[in-house]
Image: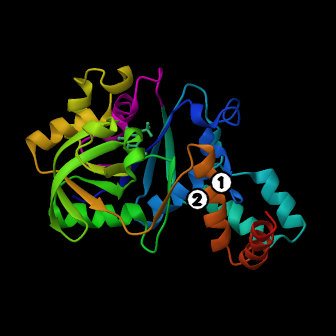
Amino acid sequence: MKISRAVIVAAGLGTRMLPASKAIPKEILPVVDRPAIQYVVEEAVAAGVSEIIVVISPGRTTALDHFETAPELERHLEMRGKDEMLDTIRRIATMAHLTAVEQAEPLGLGHAVLQARDAIGGEPFAVMLPDDLFDSKRPCLGQMMAEAERLDAPVVALLRVAKSEVPKYGIVSGRKIAERLYRLTGMVEKPTVDKAPSDLAIVGRYILPPEIFEILAQGRPGAGGEIQLTDGLIELAGRRPLYGYEFEGTRYDIGDPFGFLTAQVGFGLKRADLADNFRAYLRTIISSS
Ligand code: G1P
C-alpha cells in the first residue's frame, strides 16, 4: 500500500488548549520556534509524502498561511544578509504542496477525514493528527508506510499507555504477530478503564485505503455523539486485515498543557543551538525547587 498523500486534521476546537487556542488554531502554537503543524508537515515530507490536504474549520486558514511564500519578509532578510533565516523561510514555502478543505461543523474525526474524500480520490493515504508530535530516528509516518507497503494493508500507530490514560484514546484488541506488529481484531473509542480491551492506544498516524470514505459516509455518531474514525476502522477490520504497529520513538500529545510543556522540553533539548544552556537552566531550577 504505497502512498503519496496525507490528510492533516486541523479542524478541532482545541478546547483542551483554551484560552491559547481561542483566536488562533492550536496547530499554529509554537513548539520551540516553529508552529506545531510544521513538525507534522516535515515528518510527512521526510516519509516521502508530496501532497498534503489540511482539514480546517471554516475560514481558519492560518495554519496554511504559514506555508505560503512571504516576499516582503524574504526581501527584508535578504537586505540584512540574514541568509540562514532566508533559507529557512524559503524552505517552508516549498516543502510540500498543501491544500485546504473545510469541515463545516465539528462532527467528529471520522467526519473531518471524510471531507478530504474528493481531494484524495481512489488512492491509499495517510491521516495525521497534529496533536501528536513524534521524535524518532525514522519518521513515525515512514515507519507506518513501510509496514503498510510490506503487508499491503492498512496500518495504525500504537502506543502502550498507563491504565488510567485509556479513556483518552481509541484502544485496540489484537494478536501480536511480530515484533511491534499486531493484527487488530477490535477497538473501542475512549473506553472506561474496566471496558478497555488492552492498554494499546491508537495514536495519530494512520495509513488507510480509500474504502474508508465509503464506510465513514455511512457512519453513525458514536462516542461523544461524533462520527468516529475508530468506528470506521472497526468496520474496515471486518472487511480486510488491519494492523497496528508500535512505533519506535517518543510521542508528545501537545493538545493539552502538560503534553505541550513536555514537547517544549523534549524538542528544546534536541536543538544543538539551545541544548547546553537549556539543560543547565533546567538543572538549576530543578535543584532549587
Ligand atoms: C483521536 C482518536 C483516538 C486516538 C487519539 C490519538 O482522539 O479518536 O482514537 O486514540 O486521537 O491522539 P482525540 O484525541 O481527537 O479525542
Residue 94 shows which numbered tag? Answer: 2
* Mark 2 surroundings within 10 Å by alpha-carbon count, few (fewer than 14), some (14 through 19), many (20 or more): few
Res 64 visible: no
Magenta range: 102-126
Closest to the observer: 229 or 2? 229
Q: Residue at x 26, y 67 (%)?
A: 180
- The verdict on residue 84 being magenta is no
143 up-or-down from 106: above or below: below
Residue hosting label 1:
261
Q: Quadrant of the C terminus?
A: bottom right
Residue 160 placed where, x, y %? 35, 57
Residue at point 52%, 61% (across, down):
42
The secondary structure type at the circle numbered 1 is: helix
Magenta stretch containing residue 109, yes or no? yes
Earlier in the chain: of badge 2 and badge 1, it is: 2
Disc 2, SS: helix
* Quarter of image, res 83: bottom right
Q: Report the residue at 37% width, 44% height from top.
A: 166
Residue 34 visible in the displayed image? yes
Q: Hey, what amino acid is under mark 2? A: Thr
User: Disc 1 residue type?
Assistant: Leu
Q: Which dot, 2 or 1, sits closer to the camera?
A: 1
